[in-house]
Structures are given as structure tokens and as C-alpha cells.
Image (spheres, rainbow, N blue to C red):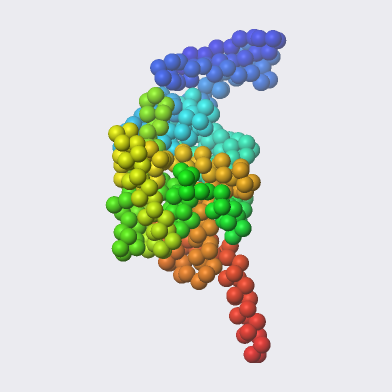
Amino acid sequence: MKGGVRKRSGSWYYYFDLGNVDGKRKKIERLAEGAQTKSEAQTVLRRKILEYENVGMVFKPSEITLHDYLNYWMKEYVELKLKLNTQYNYETTIRLHINPALGKYKLKSLTPEVLQMFVNEKVREGFARQTITIMMGILNKALRHAVYPYKYINENPMQYVELMMDTPRKATKEDLKIQSNENLKKLNKNIKEDNDFYIPFHIGLNIGLRVGETCGLEWSKIDFEEKTIEIDQQLIGEKQDDGTTKWVPSSLKSKAGYRTIAVGDSLLDILKKEKLRQKQNKLKYGKHYIKSDRVCVKENGQPLTPSIIKYHTRTISQKINIKFNYHSLRHTLATKLIENGLPVKTVQKILGHSRASITEDRYVHLTEKMQRNAANVMDMFMQDL
């Protein structure tokens, strides 16, 4: 490995080559702490090179950097195995967080210490526990594959890394932005029929769809006679080479996401009026109308996307001064259904959770009405003693 020492501003520094990143040689230069002479600086250099080379491995490790390995892993595993929205999330996390901090390291130099320092720094920077967990999960999976089947390294260093944060508390109503009846009235009053967000709002409020599911909903999946809606796809963003996002239909995250939901008359009436409105707009715009089977569209037929929905929720939130996003409608519906006695298993089916325990853990502790009912039952019991 090429390296050397030099004196700069009265202090000795050592430097040596790292691996190649995108075909370009990268170099590291650091202060040779404690070195007073060239000879002492060279001693520090040799020690640091040995540390970097991770002496003691039982076979000659690969020279590939994490940056280049992750590029390879994305193409040979992630893009072939995982869903498009997961690919996008992995690419974004790697590009914004992992590569800037760790990309220059060779795989063989990614010790548990280096990785632990990376995780600890993210904690100090104030990132949410879930965000850091995602970073750790990507690193763990990628480095596990670097052990096998790729055999670039002989051990996964991420297995020794811990997240130094307190045990996560249960989400509060404020965290989930669960809306009060007063807030729901404000929202209903301010979101008029001529607003592009009108239909998505009522879908989210009545049946708690995720934003991708709402944008992917098609008229052919609504049975007005049986009063049901079938959920079998979602709209996700696919990043293009020019940096833009193309929104495409995709399969759902889990088998539980595929579900048929019973729908009330109030939502069906809103949807019937919307279907008629879209027929009228087709005549109004003629050949300029954008044809599709989507339920949530603009006046000219252009389908709404999750990014458009996000814009509308941000705008309405600022206008009436409440903390609100689209997913808060889903949280609000779940809490109110459980508060009013609907079994957790039924709520699970409506929301498309894979396990009832997810629904129960997330919402049951928030239901003040159920807690008050429990207290009243205990009062009745105590009176009979």
C-alpha cells in the first residue's frame, strides 16, 4: 500500500491510499499524533496502515470499497429482489447517509468500531430511532451478503453494533397526529368538492387507506351493489435516470394488504357523485382529457400521486393551523373504531396489517374511552363486594 509522511505547519502528517471509488484513487491524510520526528511519523504511518488493512484475517480480503460494493449489491440483489419503493428508499438512504460517511472505506476496514461510531454519530445528530434502524438494517443486510454468497469478507461486523438509544416509547396521539372531532369538522369544512383533495380526504377518513393505496384505487375495484372496495395495488415512485420520479402501480407490501373493505353509504354517495363528475369532465375536455380508471384524479383526468396528496395536506394544515398529514386519517379511523367497540381483529383486516398485535400495540393504549369503560366496570365490581 502506498503511503508517506510530510511536515506541514510544524506538525507531522501521514497519508496513504484507500480503495478506488468510481475508478478514482482516494487518499486519507491525518495528523501523526505524538510524532516529533520523521521517523516517529513513519512509525505511526506503518501502524495506521496495519490497522486499516485489518491484519489477522485468515484469507486475503477484497480491496473493494463500501461505495462500490453497495453499487454492485443494489444492482445484483436489491433491484432484482425487492419492490420498487424499497429500492428507492435503499438508494436514498445509501446516497444521503451511508456513502458520505463510510463509502471510502474498504470492506475489510469496516470494523465494528467504525460502524458503531457511525451509528452513534447519527444518534448525536438527532435522527429518529426508526431512521437509524433503517440505516443499520441496510448495512447489516448488505454486509451479510458480502460474507455469503459474495465472500468479500469473512464476518459481518454489523452483528456487533448496537443502537445506543432508550427503549422507544409508545406513540402518543400527538405523534400519530390523531384528529379530534373538532379538527375533523374544520377539515371537512375547508375541503370543498371542487378541491382535488376532496375524494382522497374522504377515502382516508372512511376506510383508512395508505396514500399509495388511495392513489392506486380504480373504479373497477368499487362494487356499488355489494358496497365494497377491493384493495389490490398501490402507486409508488420509481426514480428515473434524469432524477425525476415516475409514479407506477405496484403490488402491496404484504399478503394482508390485499383486502376487500365494506363501505358505508356516505362514502359511496360521495364516490357516485365523483364518478358522474368525471364523466362530465370527459365531455368538457374532450380529447384533452387524460383517460384512466383511477378514482382520484384532477379535473382534467390527471391521476393524483402521493406527492400531490402530500402538497395538499401540507397546504390545508398550514391554512387551518392543525398538525395533519394523510396518514393521520388512517390513525384517526383506527382509534375511533377501537374506541367504539370494534374488535381489534376486524380493525386489522380493514387496515391491512399483517398481525393483530400490530394494530393492538399501536392503537389500543390510546383509546381513552375503553380505559374509562374498564374503570367503570371495576367500580361496579367493587360495589358488589
Q: Nearer the viewer, residue 223 or 1?
A: 223
Q: Nearer the viewer, residue 169 or 295?
A: 295
Q: Position of residue 211 (x, y in %)?
A: 44, 47
Q: Nearer the viewer, residue 26 or 76?
A: 76
Q: Please tell me how many numbered marks the rendered image carries.
A: 0
Is 337 situated left or right of 79 in this image? right
The answer to whether residue 108 is above or below residue 367 is above
Q: Position of residue 128 (x, y in %)?
A: 58, 43
**Residue at figure coordinates x 35%, y 45% from the top left:** 280
Q: Position of residue 123 (x, y in %)?
A: 61, 40
**Residue at figure coordinates x 41%, y 19% from the top left:** 22
**Residue at figure coordinates x 35%, y 50% from the top left:** 276
The answer to whether residue 104 is above or below residue 377 is above
The answer to whether residue 233 is above or below residue 360 is above
Q: Is residue 167 visible?
A: no
Q: Is residue 183 visible?
A: yes
